[in-house]
Amino acid sequence: MEIIVIGLNHKTASIEIRERLAFQESEIEEALRQIKAIPSIREAILLSTCNRVELYATCKEVEEAVQELKEFLSQFHQFPLERFEKNLYLLMGKEAVRHIFRVASSLDSMVVGEPQILGQIKEAYQKANESNASGVVLHRLLHRAFHVAKRVRTETKISNSAVSVSSVAVELAQRIFGTLEDRVVFLIGAGEMIELAARHLVSGGVRKILVTNRTYERAVSLAQEFQGEAIPFDEINRGLKKADIVISATNSPVPILTSEQITRVMKERKQRPIFFIDIADPRDIEPKVGGLENVYLFNIDDLQRVAYENLKDREKEAEKAEGIVGEEVERFVRWYHSLEVTPTIIALRKKFEEIRRRELEKMLSLHPELTEKERKSLEAMTSAIINKILHEPITQLKEKDEEAMADFYIDALQTLFQLPQSSERKEEEDARV
Amino acid sequence: MNFYFFKLAIVLYFLGTMAHSVYLLFLKEGFLRWASGIVFFGFITHTLAFLARYLEAGYTPVTNLHESLSFFAWMIIGVLLLASIRYRIKMLGAFLTPIALILMLFALALPKEILPLAPVLRSFWHPFHVVFAFLGNAFFTLAFCCGVMYLIQEHQLKSKRMGAIGKRLPSLKVLDDLNYYSLKFGFPLLTLGIITGAVWADYAWGRYWGWDPKETWSLITWFLYAALLHQRLTVGWRGRKAALMAIFGFMTVLFTFLGVNLLLPGLHTYSNW
């Protein structure tokens, strides 16, 4: 049996193709039902996010399973296979395990270290459980993946720093004001950028929002959206006096906030600190303003630079994370492998034990004159012989990390000693677990 | 007995300083818990040292430089514990514990025998004077630490960097609030210290005020903090200015306490140390 990953992500496929193949939340149950119906597939989990569509599965015959999964994707989405076949990747065995661990730890994400993906995988796993699509191997694999993600999060600093412009802005605001809950945000301009930035601050805890815009109506409609207050453009100082965080993005060709004006405002504010975010191009706020006391001015380039530096730090941490993933992959493969060799080892021991018992009984019935003590010694000696004979081969078998080699040995043992077929035994084993 | 506790407190403050530094380096919450626990035990031990000395000497042991240094350190740790209840500033211990440790080591190097109480110190008012003055000083020490942290954090923000230090520091608002909060306590205590000192001076020397160097410098310190508070409340001297003033004020406090004793001869140097 083999673990496989088949899918595509932001690196291999354009957004159009990803969207075409994405599964709606409501479709997942039906999709899992169809996958389960494929005879060569034993277990399956379906992960569909805006950046990736992936199927994790275990199967008996890889080639057959892969072909059928591809056809399933094509049929389900009514999308010809040749349009996306080249975007698909296929991973098997150890590489599949590594891939799943890396995805869960957000090492394969568009923005490395962003933690949402873990939640998405957990959800996918839960859906598969509800549909009875996952089994022993994927259970274990996914639980290990969650464990790896946790290790990566606690042992590296991969998710510690803000790497998007908006999150940098929120982090800076927190370094100035502590909690953002009682802060007032003042938006100058009513464009898309402003709205996006405001949304981030609101999710960062800000409650009160003021808006101004040259066209007053736009200000009013944006203010309504945030249950804020619109201020006419010529009363801009009123907003500046109240606000703690000011985000400016107008189309004005010249700065709309000058250093003299802000100096006056600061006096009226009794020097309460103020945080300006200038995301306009050309700038809305004179750079000199940043030099004033208790005024913190960041423009879009500053925020981008900070985000970029943090991203570089993250990449350094990612190397550490890859080490953790590697370690855990080895550990999982060893477990998975033991699943394969254990039945063979049991069968082998059983066979030897039967031979020993038969021969011992034969010998004891020929020699009834033996004392109890002598019988015991014979028993012990024969046991020791088979243990010693089997010791080396079993150790070797357990240590064979490479799956192909292990399969070869298992086949050889089964043929040489005429052991019962291991796949049947595995079924039993699975059922038992 | 008191000296045994005193030395134990030094050891604990030392370990606390170490644990706080390790916390700063690795940011593992576990170290912070250890550090806070050790410092807390240090404070208990220190309290026992103070009580033991009080019983052994038969008077409030704040009569020479060894005793006052130790008392000052004790108050600083007390203020640290107090501030930690109200503000969750994880880095505060890393700043205040070493200061207390240095004062303690200084005290360790000084003569520490219990001597018969000098007649001039035999006054009901003297212990009050010392307790108020040092408790006030301890709050000024807290304000000083907040000032230093504020300047570091502000520098990082102004230079538009998100360095590792800035991330470990509290927000500017919390630092400025705590600065103000320490002054609100420190200043009235200093005022009470000066008033009780004057009352005691009247008993001891027959005059309330004699422009002895210690008295003069206390007054300078008092004016400094009064100015800071006044400016803060009227024209909004907050943030950087308040931080700088708190640092400058602390220098004055140190000079009033140590500099005057060591450099300028006057009535407050009643013992050799």
Image (spheres, coloured by chain):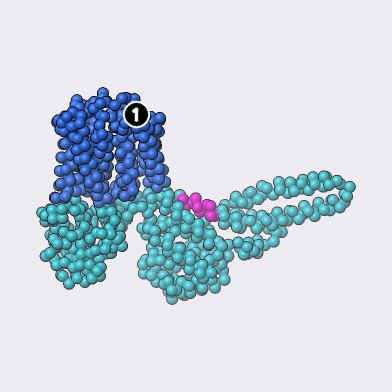
Chain colours: A cyan, B blue
Q: Quadrant of residue B267?
A: top left
Q: Is residue A91 above or below residue A392?
A: below
Q: Secondary structure at mark 1?
A: helix
- State the residue in front, A209 or B204: B204
- State the residue in front, B161 or A283: B161
Which residue appears at 73% of the width and 56% of the height? A351
Left or right of A391, for residue A54: left
**What is the x, y in percent for residue A370?**
86, 46
Which residue appears at 42% of the width and 46% of the height? B30
**Predominant SS of the magenta segment:** helix
Residue lying farthest top?
B272
- State the residue in front, B218 or B209: B209
Left or right of A221, for residue A7: right
- State the residue in front, B273 or B99: B273
Which residue appears at 38% of the width and 41% of the height? B40
**What is the x, y in percent for residue B206?**
17, 29
Quarter of the rendering occupied by the N terminus of chain A: bottom right
Mark 1, chain letter? Answer: B
Q: Residues within 10 Å of mark 1 (few under 14, many from 20)?
A: some
**What is the x, y in percent for residue B204?**
20, 29
Query: Magenta segment, which residues?
Result: A324-333
Dot 1 corresponds to which residue?
B57
**What is the x, y in percent for residue B198?**
18, 34
